[in-house]
Image: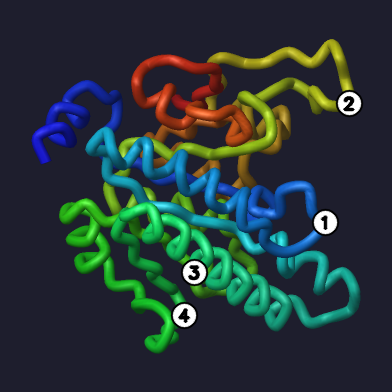
């Protein structure tokens, strides 16, 4: 793996966590998984993995079921959240399948034990997978209701000693207002955790931002729709916003 070792010395980060929403896997559909979109995102992950970067992932479940929406329709919040966690496992298995078809060894690790389909979350084992060059996809959130996958991503990134969270979105950074609705929206190159909370910029929910801030974990917001964007940022290029202290 000489090329991987060379790549690791030229990238800004050695170990990162990629957080994407479940909706990112829908493509242009209104629901579920769009296999070509899953494969495209897997290709982005593989291109960064080929640099020698250790990658873990957290994928939301909003393309299948969102706990908050379920509870808004009269379902008990705890039950709705557990259903949302199960949706993230389905997304994680789809991403694992796409990555392994490309020759990238991948482990799905669930906060809710389900031994027939994936591994239970054991921190030291997960770290070992990363050290061996496997992509780890953390599923089922934190295993607890009332916590979002944003919070799960920040928690796992800290536990895995990741150097940054990469949040893939539909836009190329953090804006002062929705750039799809407002033509005069301005993009931030850098923004502090406190500004994100005070201005309600919607990068992640408040508990995730606070957890990142308290552990000095930078969050890099970039466009998942831009081919090569993920790899470009790790090579010191591209357009993005960094949230830091």
In this rendering, the answer to whether 140 lies above or below 99 is below
Q: Secondary structure at mark 1?
A: loop
Helix, strand or loop at label 2? It is loop
Q: Which residue is mark 4?
A: 112
Q: Which residue is mark 3?
A: 93
Mark earlier in primary sequence (2, 4): 4
**Residue 10 left/right relative to 17:** left
Compute the Cα span from label 1 to label 4. Answer: 27 Å
User: Which residue: 55% across, 22% down?
Assistant: 241
Q: Earlier in the sequence, mark 1 or mark 3?
A: 1
| Horizontal arrangement in the rendering, residue 116 relative to residue 186 (left or right) | left
Q: Earlier in the sequence, mark 3 or mark 2?
A: 3
In whole angstroms, how far apart are the C-alphas of marks 2 and 4? 39 Å
> Which residue, as the protein is rendered here, is positioned at the far left?
2
Mark-to-mark CA distance, 3 and 4: 14 Å
Is residue 139 visible in the rendered image? The answer is: yes
Q: Circle 4 sits in a helix, a strand or a loop, which is it?
A: loop
Q: What whole-number distance in Å separates the C-alpha atoms at marks 1 and 3? A: 20 Å
Of badges 1 and 4, nearer the viewer stands: 1
Q: Of the residues tagged 2 and 1, which is closer to the observer?
A: 1
Q: Residue at x 67, y 15 (%)?
A: 187
Q: On the picture, is 24 further left or further right than 10? A: right
Label 1 belongs to which residue? Answer: 30
Residue drawn at point x = 59 percent, y = 72 percent: 85
* Occupied quadrant, residue 69: bottom right
């Amino acid at each position: 793996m000489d090329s991987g070792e060379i790549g690791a010395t030229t990238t800004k980060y050695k170990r990162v966590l990629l957080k994407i929403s479940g909706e990112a896997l829908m493509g242009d559909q209104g629901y579920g998984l769009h296999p070509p979109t899953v494969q495209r995102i897997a290709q982005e992950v593989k291109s960064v993995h080929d640099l020698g970067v250790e990658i873990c992932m957290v994928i939301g479940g909003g393309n299948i079921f969102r706990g908050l929406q379920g509870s808004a329709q009269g379902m008990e919040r705890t039950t709705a959240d557990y259903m949302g966690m199960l949706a993230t496992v389905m997304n994680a298995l789809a991403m694992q399948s796409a990555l392994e078809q490309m020759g990238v060894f991948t482990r799905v690790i669930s906060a809710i034990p389900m031994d027939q389909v994936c591994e239970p979350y054991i921190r030291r084992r997960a770290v070992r997978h990363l050290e061996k060059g496997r992509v780890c996809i953390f599923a089922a959130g934190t295993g607890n209701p009332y916590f979002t996958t944003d919070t799960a991503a920040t928690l796992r990134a800290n536990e895995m000693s990741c150097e940054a969270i990469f949040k893939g979105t539909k836009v190329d950074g953090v804006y002062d207002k929705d750039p799809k609705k407002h033509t005069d929206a301005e993009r931030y190159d850098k923004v502090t955790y406190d500004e994100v909370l005070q201005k309600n910029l919607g990068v992640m929910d408040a508990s995730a931002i606070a957890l990142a801030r308290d552990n000095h974990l930078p969050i890099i917001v970039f466009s998942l729709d831009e081919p090569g964007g993920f790899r470009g940022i790790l090579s010191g290029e591209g357009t993005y916003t960094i949230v830091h202290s």
